[in-house]
Image: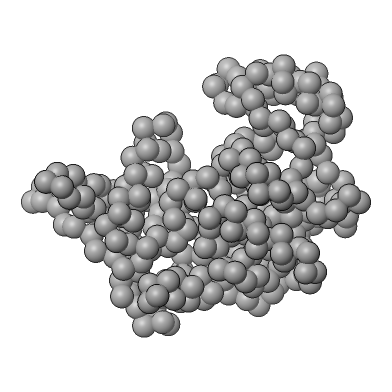
Amino acid sequence: MRIGLIAASEERAMTGMSDLRSAIKRHGHVPCEFLVDRAGVRMGNGKVSVFASADMHGITEEKLDGALLRNIGIVKDYEQLGQRIWTLRSLEICGTYVMNNVMPWLSASDKFSTLVTLSEAGLPVPDTVSSEDFFAGYRATREFKSSVIKPLRSGLGLGVFKVDDPDVAMHIFSYFVNVNKPIYVQRFLEKKGGGDYRIIVVGDKVIGAEFRKGKTWKSNISQGGVPRKAKINGEMSELAIKATKAMGLDFAGIDMVETKDGYYILETNPTVGWSGFKSVTGVDPAEHIVSHLISKLKA
């Protein structure tokens, strides 16, 4: 079978791609690069087809049995986002099983969408306010006292602020509003152990967990956080699996914290990175993800 690795040109060498490529080969299948920003869709005569690239001599229709979605690159506006998302949706329409499916992937990549979906499913998330009105943000920071302000679409802990003064928060909110960005503010949680858990779920199974503790309040590995292998209890495993299912994902990295009031799910990561996880747990997520994809293709 031909299995695509979906990325954008500038992100084609991102962490995990080589692991996935190796796992596909170990299973006796062929890994194929699929660059979403160079692909396109042709429509007409009652047919939709996807091509991976084009040149002056024509276009070649892409035929993939399955594909693994790693990223869609840096998106600069709504039309570009729509082009890339609907290119991948068209790939699914043409019969390719994309993992994670693009619409759940898009939803889980957005913090606002994630928390709405998890809340609807009755799962525990931090007190959060999302709005385009900076007075809503101001009221939330006054109520929450210590607050965390985040972009809706970001990763690696970048662009995330911890604020204890609502008047300082107003300066951040003013900037967000001036560049047409929504305000997303969350109650700061005092974490037991001073860090958080990254739990990786593939299918209906937790394959492992790490505990990450940073030099500051941020626990991200990219921000200097140090991972260690973690043993998690049945409640944490159940919450992680339920969160993955609620988001409609085949696999995910679930970020969770323990507090004096219990567990809270912070984020669901449909493009989970695993360099730190792999080094401390000895578990290769790529092997589990590829095995799960192949089982879906054979079903």
90 displayed left or right of 154? left
Res 125 visible? yes
Farthest residue in the left direction?
57
Specify the quadrant that holds the N terminus.
Answer: bottom left
Residue 80 lies in quadrant: top left
Farthest residue in the right direction?
260
Which percent across, then down, holds residue 225? 74, 56
Which percent across, then down, holds residue 285? 57, 71
Which percent across, then down, holds residue 224? 72, 53
Q: Is residue 261 above or below residue 127?
A: below
Which percent across, then down, holds residue 50? 24, 53
Residue in the image at 37% along x and 63% along y:
97
Residue in the image at 17% along x and 50% along y:
47
21 displayed left or right of 92? right
Residue in the image at 60% along x and 58% along y:
244
218 displayed left or right of 66? right
Specify the quadrant that holds the C terminus.
Answer: bottom left
Res 225 visible? no
Q: Is residue 39 above or below residue 146?
A: below
Q: Is residue 139 above or below residue 299?
A: above
**Chosen colour scheme:** one colour
Residue in the image at 21% along x and 52% along y:
49
How many numbered dots are placed on residues in this image? 0
25 displayed left or right of 156? left
Residue 76 lies in quadrant: top left
